[in-house]
Image (spheres, helix red, strand yellow):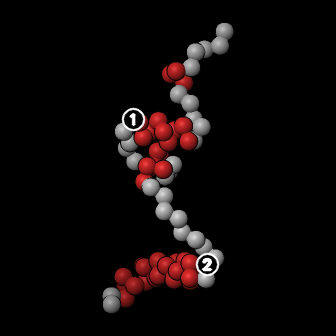
Amino acid sequence: MNARFSQKTKHIDIRHYFIRDHINTKDIKLKYIPTMEIIANILTKPLARPAFELLRLKLSIISLTNVKPRL
């Protein structure tokens, strides 16, 4: 193995084994979340309007273009 590559990826190996050990001891339980339910996608991906609005609703963010001004 290339020593230079190994030094740059050593932290990835350590994290991988750390997490794997905790999963095996049942300290961590992984749960599948469908892509369209991952709220962070609103900040990281271009989304179609319906998906954007659904995730925006989950964040409790309102659109100011639909709010009437108070007088």
| Residue at 51 percent of width and 49 percent of height | 39
SS of the residue at dot 2? loop
Whether residue 14 is visible to the viewer of this picture, yes or no, is no
User: Residue under circle 1?
Assistant: 49
Name the amino acid, label 2.
Answer: Lys
Q: Reply above or below: 1 against 15.
A: below
User: Residue under circle 2?
Assistant: 26
| Residue at 42 percent of width and 79 percent of height | 8
SS of the residue at dot 1? helix
Q: Using the numbered discs, state the Cα–Cα distance from disc 1 to disc 2 in whole angstroms.
A: 39 Å
- Total numbered circles: 2
Disc nearest the viewer among 1 and 2: 2
Q: Reply above or below: 10 against 57.
A: below
Q: Position of residue 25 (x, y in %)?
A: 61, 83
Q: Residue furthest right?
A: 71
Q: Quadrant of the C terminus?
A: top right
Circles 1, 2 touching at the beta carbon (< 8 Å):
no
Q: Earlier in the sequence, mark 1 or mark 2?
A: 2
Q: Residue furthest top?
A: 71
Q: Nearer the viewer, residue 60 or 44?
A: 60
Name the amino acid, label 1.
Answer: Arg
Whether residue 59 is visible to the viewer of this picture, yes or no, is yes
Is 39 on the left-hand or right-hand side of 22?
Answer: left
Q: Position of residue 65 (x, y in %)?
A: 50, 22
Q: Position of residue 62 (x, y in %)?
A: 56, 30
| Residue at 38 percent of width and 42 percent of height | 47
